[in-house]
Image: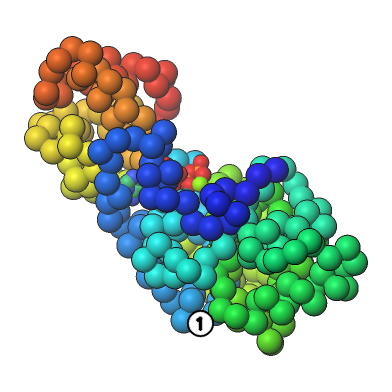
Amino acid sequence: MTTAGRQGRLPAEREDHYMRLRGAHVVGTRALLAVRENIRAAIDAKAMICIYGPTGHGKSMAVNASLRDLAPQITHRIQFRARPSTRDLRHELFHALGLPGRPPSHAIEFDRTLRGALEEPRVLVCDEAQWLSKLCFEYLRYLWDDTSTDLTIIFTGGNGCFEMLQSEPMLESRVYAWQEIDPMALDEVLTVIPAFHPVWTQADPDLIAMCDREAAHGNFRAWAKITHHLTAGLKQTARTTVDEDLLRWAYSKLGRRAA
Ligand SMILES: Nc1ncnc2c1ncn2[C@@H]1O[C@H](COP(=O)(O)OP(=O)(O)OP(=O)(O)O)[C@@H](O)[C@H]1O
Ligand SMILES: [Mg+2]
């Protein structure tokens, strides 16, 4: 079980890029722009929202990039890779909020400490929310419902996140907006990929379309991975531009994947 970033703070932008891909830029995909608007509205309303969808489509990138612009100082991230207990959750919140001293040993005192800290405006990002148990959701709802707290919660996650939140009626009915992140359509790929990385700036749009059709399927992590291989391949072969052979070599590394 780990917390991303420095004690629950937003990671630096380069950490968001797949394997810290050099030269990569954050691009304004439709998904990212919609996430930014939903997060802006959620912060204004002090709401809970849920951003979900399959792996690699840019959820974490969109949430982090938006919050770096909108609320970097008051954003706190918690993330779990295994199912936490409410005790784990309390400790995770304590550390993510950067509270001083040692975590209180009694639940009542712990709750008072957390509620006190949440009286200041805070944005809490729960990444990989599908790992949270019913009791953890209940606990977050309890903190959010408290009229003295000033809390925005952004739930985000992959497979199962939507279903998990929907299966908690008390939580589901409080969620202000739901946003599913879809794969990029070809027209969007042709617009954003040339801006994503210098290797694509002058690339033939037909090559980009071929790569999307045969390998990337509108999945941004796949695009980043192919770009990583491609930059290595360009360097090894002392080439400066992408051609079909090199591109096929780069995405042959991904293995076969159905669209
Ligand atoms: N808007 C974007 N601009 C540039 N690169 C992006 C963008 N969105 C995604 N990427 C690239 O795709 C990778 C995967 O994105 P991200 O980690 O946000 O996916 P995810 O939907 O959170 O996946 P998972 O469900 O596995 O956590 C990023 O590390 C980054 O390299
Ligand atoms: Mg993610």
Q: Point out the image quarter for the C terminus.
A: top left
Q: Nearer the viewer, residue 139 or 209?
A: 139
Q: Quadrant of residue 226?
A: top left
Would residue 45 appear left or right of 62 to someone viewing this image?
Answer: right
Q: Which residue ends up furthest to the right in the rendered image?
A: 106
| Quadrant holding the N terminus | top right
Q: Mark 1 belongs to which amino acid?
A: Ala
Neighbour tally class for label 1: few under 14, some 14-19, many 20 plus, Cα within 10 Å: few
Residue 212 visible here: yes
Res. 106 image quadrant: bottom right
The answer to whether one can see residue 221 in this image is: no
Q: Which residue does the image show at 44% across and 66% down from the upper left?
A: 72
Tell me: 103 left or right of 226. Answer: right
Element marked by disc 1: helix
Viewer-proximal residue among 150 and 203? 150
Q: Position of residue 140 (x, y in %)?
A: 71, 68
Instruction: Measuring from the top left, give residue 99's x and y in whole percent.
Output: 68, 66
Above or below 98: residue 232 = above
Return the residue at label 1: 45
Where residue 142 sits in the image (x, y, percent)?
Answer: 75, 74
Q: Position of residue 67 (x, y in %)?
A: 43, 64
Left or right of 255 in this view: 212: left
Note whether ligand 1 is within 8 Å of mark 1. Answer: no
Q: Residue at x 30, y 50 (%)?
A: 26
Count every numbered label the image shows and give the total. Answer: 1
